[in-house]
Image (cartoon, grey):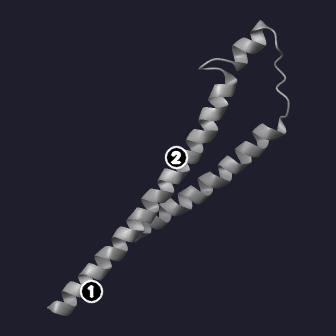
Amino acid sequence: MRAGGNELLAAKAGLDAVLAILRTVVAANGTETWGDDSYGRQFADGKTGYRSSRTNLLDGGRDFATTIGEFGTGLIGAADRTDRTEAGNTARF
């Protein structure tokens, strides 16, 4: 359990690093260059447009990384509690 928790925490750290690079690259592209005509608005706006997709990707990635970290921390905590319970039971017998 503990090893799995540590692997999840390592995966979270890796995902956090990738997301930081992605945010930097997206921000570095600067001003939105697709224009304000009907084609530009069609590309950028709406539920499936670039702006919404960008936000969903960045927010979803952050939330996914957080969840992976919480699972990892939970597994490590469960392993710690199991060890304490085992030690207590061993001492009683």
Quarter in which the N terminus is drawn = bottom left
Looking at the image, residue 33 sits to the left or right of residue 69; the answer is: right
Looking at the image, residue 49 sits to the left or right of residue 39; the answer is: left
Q: What residue type is labelled 1?
A: Ala
Residue 33, picture quadrant: top right
Q: Residues within 10 Å of mark 1 (few under 14, many from 20)?
A: few
**Secondary-structure class at tag 2:** helix
Q: Which amino acid does label 2 sit on?
A: Phe
Examine the rendered structure and indicate whether residue 29 appears above or below residue 13.
Answer: above
Residue at the image point whose x is 35% and y is 72% from the top: 79
Examine the rendered structure and indicate whether residue 77 appears above or below residue 31.
Answer: below
| C-beta proximity under 8 Å, tags 2 and 1 | no
Q: Which of marks 2 and 1 is nearer the N terminus?
A: 2
Q: Where is residue 5 in the image (x, y as percent from the top left)?
A: 44, 64
Tell me, for residue 87, which label it has, or none: 1
Residue at the image point whose x is 19% and y is 85% from the top: 89
Exactly how many numbered labels are in the figure?
A: 2
Quarter in which the C terminus is drawn = bottom left
Tell me, for residue 64, which label it has, or none: 2
Residue at the image point whose x is 63% and y is 28% from the top: 53
Tell me, for residue 31, which label it has, or none: none
Q: How crowded is mark 2: few (under 14 residues within 10 Å), some or many (20 or more)?
A: some
**For the view shown, which residue lies furthest in the top direction?**
38
Looking at the image, residue 79 sits to the left or right of residue 17; the answer is: left
**Secondary-structure class at tag 1:** helix
Examine the rendered structure and indicate whether residue 38 appears above or below residue 90.
Answer: above
Q: Where is residue 45 in the image (x, y as percent from the top left)?
A: 68, 18
Q: Position of residue 25 (x, y in %)?
A: 78, 41
Residue at the image point whose x is 64% and y is 34% from the top: 55
Cα gap from disc 2 to disc 1, whole angstroms: 35 Å
**For the view shown, which residue lies furthest in the left direction?**
93
